[in-house]
Amino acid sequence: MPVSAGPLRALAAAAVVALLSGCATTNLQDPLEGYNRTVFRFNDAVDRTVLKPTATAYKNVTPGFVQTGVNNFFGNLSDAWSAVNNLLQGKGQAGMGDVTRVAVNSTFGIFGLLDIASEAGIPKHNEDFGQTLGVWGVPSGPFVMLPLLGPSTVRDTAALPADIGGDIWKYKEPANWRNIGAAVRVVDKRATLLDAGNLLEDAALDRYEFIRDGYMQRRQSQVYDGNVPRETQADEATSNAEPAADPAGKAVAEPAVKPAQ
């Protein structure tokens, strides 16, 4: 039976409208806003119906020391990838600090269940390959809302395969243990964000815009280790480009274009 042309025309029209709504935005950091908002609504629905209730039950039922142990365990695994990225960024002291954290917590901390390194004054870093690309001078590109994964940018999305490959838990065998651990990891991470999420729901008039702007500012701060140059902050108001940061984590500022006096 031939397919009616009516539904096909409606589908094509909907696609064009979505595309034009994304292109018509005046926010240069979010040219795909129409698409991103659609994905945001999908993610929000999944969170409200599945993830948030599960995380709430986990937080209410699971003893606090168990939650701390789970968080420490996966945090210790992430320190290994953080060490690699710090070294790739030329931050040798921070990278070796991460290596020391993994060694100390994996042994004296009982496979990372206890965070002995923090108690010993060895700071924790949270570095990923998206930040490494930023330090190397790769601009963030536009904002992108990824299905299930949440806020990102073109640069951070391109870095995802490396971040996934650098996750030690990805190689855990047998597969059923790996899958169970991955699920617990997601639920535990969502549980740590419950209070912040409730505050966001109460305070933000446009949660999508609040999350987008907050994510972009946070990622920029992470690339520069909190030392974002004023020139870059001004540029971000009209552009999504990020100047390169030097290997020590300090920004290499570009000359600012000042209006004629």
Image (tube, rainbow, N blue to C red):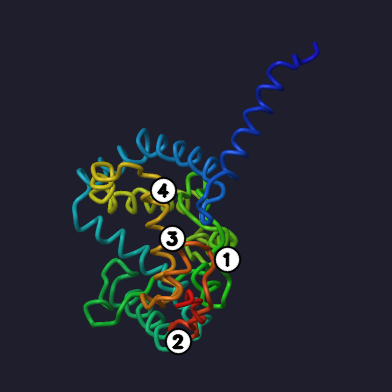
User: Disc 4 vs disc 3: which is toward the camera?
Assistant: 3
Q: Do labels 1 and 2 touch, CB within 8 Å?
A: no
User: x, y percentage for residue 90?
Assistant: 50, 86
User: x, y percentage for residue 185?
Assistant: 38, 54
Secondary structure beneath label 4: helix
The residue carrying mark 4 is 183
Q: Quadrant of the C terminus?
A: bottom left
Q: Quadrant of the N terminus?
A: top right
Residue displayed at 57% across by 39% down: 21
- Of 129 and 40, nearer the camera is 40
Task: State left or right for residue 237 relative to residue 241.
Answer: left
- Of 119 and 82, nearer the camera is 82
User: x, y percentage for residue 202?
Assistant: 23, 42
Secondary structure beneath label 2: loop
Instruction: State how far apart marks 2 and 4 are (Cα).
Output: 36 Å
Q: Amino acid at mark 1?
A: Ala
